[in-house]
Image: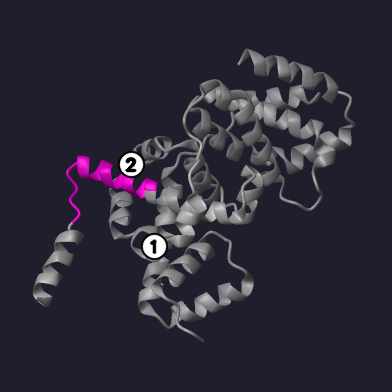
Amino acid sequence: MDNFTSNELSQKINMYLDRSLNEDDQKDLIQRIAQNPEGMAQFNREKNIREKLKERVQRHPVSPGLIARIKNSLGK
Amino acid sequence: MLEISFLCIKISKSLKKAPPADHLRFEQEFLPHAEALNTFAFHLTYNEDDAADLVQETYMKAFRFIDKFEEGTNAKAWLFKILKNAYINNYRKKNKRPMQVDYEESSAYQDGDDQTHISSYVDLREEIFDNMMGDEVEAALNSMPVDFKTVILLCDIEGFSYEEIAKIIDIPVGTVRSRLFRARNMLKEKLEDYAKSLGYKDYRGDKNQKNMNDDN
């Protein structure tokens, strides 16, 4: 298993957390960071940041009125 | 708004003929994504009423063109694509805002030799998030050009993969990656600027300088 450069590691972590890494590469990354405390710390930090961003962006639930409008416009 | 209302009435007339089974399937498979669509629409329009109109138009178009939807593919992604196109047609042209990304974003991403120091959501941002309320993060996000904000909303908030985002906004996967990379850096800079305006100090530079001095 060749070592990743820091850029490669960073890119793979981003792709993993962005659900855009294929299954083999996911397994490979998990194995690598399990043996690399710095990589694991970077992974956890990136994951944490994404979770915090998601928590802080407000959801906008649809009003019952809008659902009724949609259903009505569809003929229900 | 008036334009959309006319469009909705026009589409609505053709929809009322659809069989009940189509309505049921539509409600079960497509309507559960209404909140995600409304959240995305709000961040594009900054207006609750416009967002609601956009969501309604999206559903009417989706229902009208349901035969174009490929079974087994991602219904949420398909709806987002319709909403994005409706937004471009109805709002973006009208506003004529300078928000298109027209530079060589792909090469900027691929040519970067040392992206690590800026591509990561580094410690400072993590601390900033801890100390910021949702409103401040939203303000930073909303101040971004729409093309950049869009990829963050689709990836980080709605959980779409690069491939799905590429289909939604009609750009190559490589461009999604590069745009996301730039968008995250832009958001990071905005959050840092905001934090600094509140008196938050980034000590990392001082620490690095101290280490360099120690080495010498």
**Whether residue B161 is visible:** no
The residue located at (18%, 60%) in the rendering is B205
Callout 1, which amino acid? Gln
Image disc number at residue A18? none
Q: Is residue B171 above or below residue B87?
A: below
Magenta stretch secondary structure, dominant: helix
Label 2, label 1: how many angstroms apart (C-alpha)? 28 Å
- Asked if B20 appears above or below B153 in the picture, the reply is above
Mark 2 is surrounded, within 10 Å at the Cα level, by few (under 14), some (14 to 19) or many (20 or more) other residues, namely few
* Residue B168 point in image, percent of width and height: 64, 44
* Residue A70 left/right relative to B211: right
Vertical relation: B75 (above or below) B216: above
Q: Is residue B193 magenta?
A: yes
Q: Which residue is mark 2?
A: B133
Marked residue chain, label 1: B
| Residue at x-position 53% and y-position 55% | B177
Secondary structure of the residue carrying numbered label 1: loop
Residue A39: quadrant of the picture: bottom left
Q: Which residues are magenta?
A: B186-202
Residue pointed to by mark 1 = B115
Tell me residue A14's x, y (percent): 48, 62
**In the image: residue B164, left or right of residue A2:** right
Q: Are marks 2 and 1 in contact (CB under 8 Å)?
A: no
Q: Position of residue B128 (x, y in %)?
A: 29, 50
Please name the amino acid that badge 2 sits on. Answer: Met
Can residue B158 be spotted in the picture? yes
* Magenta stretch contains residue B118: no
> Could you say which is closer to the camera, residue A15 or residue B104?
B104
Residue B160, given in percent of the width and then of the height, sits at 59, 52
Residue under the point 81% across and 48% down: B70
Q: State the quadrant of the N terminus of chain B.
A: top right
